[in-house]
Amino acid sequence: MAHLLIVEDDELLRDGLSAQLMQAGHRISLAEDGQIALERLEAQSFDGVVLDLGLPKVDGLSVLRRLRERLPALPVLVLTARDGVEDRVAGLNAGADDYLTKPFSLDELQARLQALLRRANLPAAGAPRTASAGAETLRLESHPPRVWIGQDAVDLTLREWTLLELLMRHTGQVVSREDVITAWQAEPGDSSGVASNALEVYVHRLRRKLASAPLNIRNIRGLGYMLEASGV
């Protein structure tokens, strides 16, 4: 099973998460503050991270940003006691793959985390997906999740990869918001998809990463999104 890092300053919650995830067969490492989390991430290899935002010493958003600089594809599930939209958007912009607002169900956390871990093992078989505009090409690879813009590689998070893969598969066609959220679900009935209003955050983040690409993501009002040649 997976080797997970749990970063949580609340001892009772940290122990509860550890016990539940160990019972599910995972190997667990713990960190009670942001500084220890960064040291663990530097010294060890992990398959996923459960990260509280309200941490002492180094706050969770700072940990997340520094983590993303080194490990752009590592699945990260953020925990936060802050239920404002701005706080959730800040976490997503910093690179979170998913989030849960406290209090939450341990069963829901385990289901969401399992979905992130499944998406991290995307099949590598088959040729990389490509999309072209003029003489320039966008090339998507699954291991590690990244896109090549000409000769430049841009690392993606799992949700960004899935979003771009869906848009590239339907280049020039409208992809609905519902189609994107469905694609983020690991399997039918999985409840791990993000709320529809958080989708804009991922689209904005992906647009930023594709700023130098020959294709861009167009918002089709009331319908969804379309990948098309820049300047169209």
Image (spheres, rainbow, N blue to C red):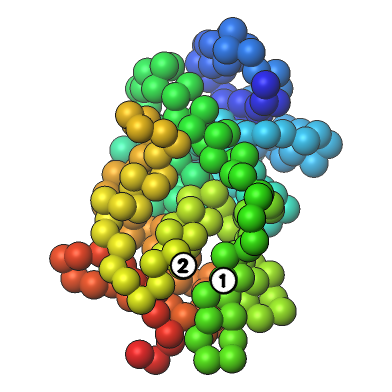
- Secondary structure, mark 2, is helix
Number of the label disc, if any, that sits on residue 130: 1
Query: Which residue does the image show at 54% across and 11% down from the upper left?
Result: 20
Residue 198: % across, % down: 33, 51
Q: Quadrant of the C terminus?
A: bottom left
- Secondary structure, mark 1, is strand
Q: For this view, does 140 lie left or right of residue 211? A: right
Number of the label disc, if any, that sits on residue 55: none
Residue 123 vs residue 148, the one in the foreground: 123
Asked where in the image residue 201 lies, by quadrant, the reply is bottom left
Q: Amino acid at mark 2?
A: Met
Label 2, residues with CA under 10 Å away: few <14, some 14-19, many ≥20: many
On screen, residue 88 above or below 51 = below
Q: Are marks 1 and 2 in contact (CB under 8 Å)?
A: yes
Looking at the image, tell me whether mark 1 or mark 2 is earlier in sequence order: 1
Among all residues in the image, which is located at the extreme front? 126
Residue 82 vs residue 48, the one in the foreground: 48
Query: Which residue does the image show at 66% across and 49% down from the upper left?
Result: 124
Q: Amino acid at mark 1?
A: Thr
Asked where in the image residue 102 lies, by quadrant, the reply is top left
Residue 85: % across, % down: 30, 48
- Label 2: which residue? 168
Query: Which residue does the image show at 26% across and 51% down from the upper left?
Result: 178
Q: Is residue 10 visible?
A: yes
Residue 183: % across, % down: 39, 47
Give me the C-alpha separation between circle 1 and circle 2. 7 Å
